[in-house]
Amino acid sequence: MTFSPADTTPFADHFRFDRGGIEHSVFVKGEGPGVLLMHELPGMMPEFWRLANWLSEHFTVWAPDLFGNDSSHTPAKQGLLTLKACISREIHLFADNDPGPITQWLRALAQELHQRVGGNGVGTIGMCMTGNFALTLALDPWVTAPVVSQPGIPGSTPFKNRDGGLQMTSSEKGQLAGRDVDVMGLRFDGDKFCKAARFDAIRSVIGEDRFFENVLPDSARKPNGRLKFPHSVLTTDLVDEKDSVTKQKLAEVITFLKSRV
């Protein structure tokens, strides 16, 4: 697969989406089947927009700004400042079984995307903070290609091990198990936020045959990454070279999405 030169320019077009008392801006680019791309912490970094622009060459990409609702996206540093309010109101980062109201808003957004672009369904990509959101969105029939990249929430503490947490209730896990939907997962082997237990939990819910698991060696990460350990497979730890392992995995993500949306 051939990629265009990296472009970190934020999408110019956007609209505001309001459901259930939650309103955020959604940035739009591309044509064809729909993909909902959810940013990680600390927010819409340049590497996020690089990924978004690559995806927009194949899909209609909707990128919601979960930290803001203005005409310009929330800078990553500002996103960290607004995170405290989002945690208390919309995003429950440390809850075992409840990711918060934001996932209901995202489910409505994914349905809206499918209604506008049509096709078999839409793809969803969640990363780190939003990684497990992709699983919750997959409860709906219009989501046919969920991608879960380094899902890091809920995080463990010295007092409670949440390494295998999915932020889903037993009922939701049962619903997901009953859906005939494939899930693609990506993480680095040495990721301290997303450990093997989390992928084990996903596999136990959807089954071995439907979980397309990808565990990358730590050596595949970009040198001198943002964190001391490897984490962000598709953004800050992606090596933008033709034959890099991470670039190849991005190509596989695009192929996974194309075959299902």
Image (cartoon, helix red, strand yellow):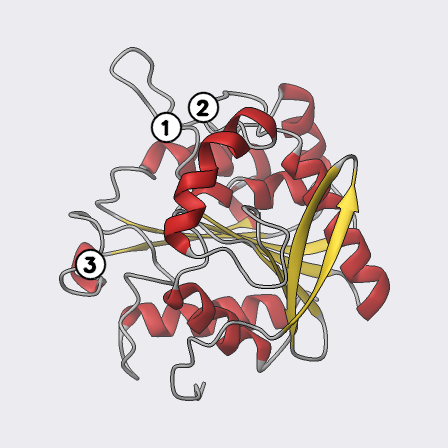
Amino acid type indicated by mark 2? Phe
Q: Are marks 3 and 2 in contact (CB under 8 Å)?
A: no
Mark closest to the chain's N terminus, 1 or 2: 2
Residue sitting at 28 percent across and 70 percent down? 245
Q: Up-down: is 27 above or below 23? A: below
Q: Up-down: is 146 above or below 238? A: above
Q: Which numbered circle lies on residue 225?
A: 3
Q: Is residue 155 left or right of residue 39?
A: left
Amino acid type indicated by mark 3? Gly
Mark closest to the chain's N terminus, 3 or 1: 1
Query: Which quarter of the picture shows residue 37?
Result: bottom right
Secondary structure found at label 3? loop
Amino acid type indicated by mark 1? Gly
Residue 47 is situated, as x and y percent measured from the top left of the image, at 37, 66
Mark closest to the chain's N terminus, 3 or 2: 2
Q: Up-down: is 257 above or below 195? A: below
Residue sitting at 45 percent across and 85 percent down? 1
Residue 80 is situated, as x and y percent measured from the top left of the image, at 40, 43
Q: Which residue is mark 2?
A: 94
Q: Note whether residue 176 is visible.
A: yes
Residue sitting at 58 percent across and 77 percent down? 56
> Quadrant where the C terminus lies?
bottom right
Q: Is residue 167 left or right of residue 190?
A: right
| Distance Cα–Cα, label 1 vs label 2 | 6 Å
Residue sitting at 70 percent across and 80 percent down? 31
| Distance Cα–Cα, label 3 vs label 2 | 25 Å
Residue 203 is situated, as x and y percent measured from the top left of the image, at 49, 38
Q: Which residue is mark 1?
A: 155
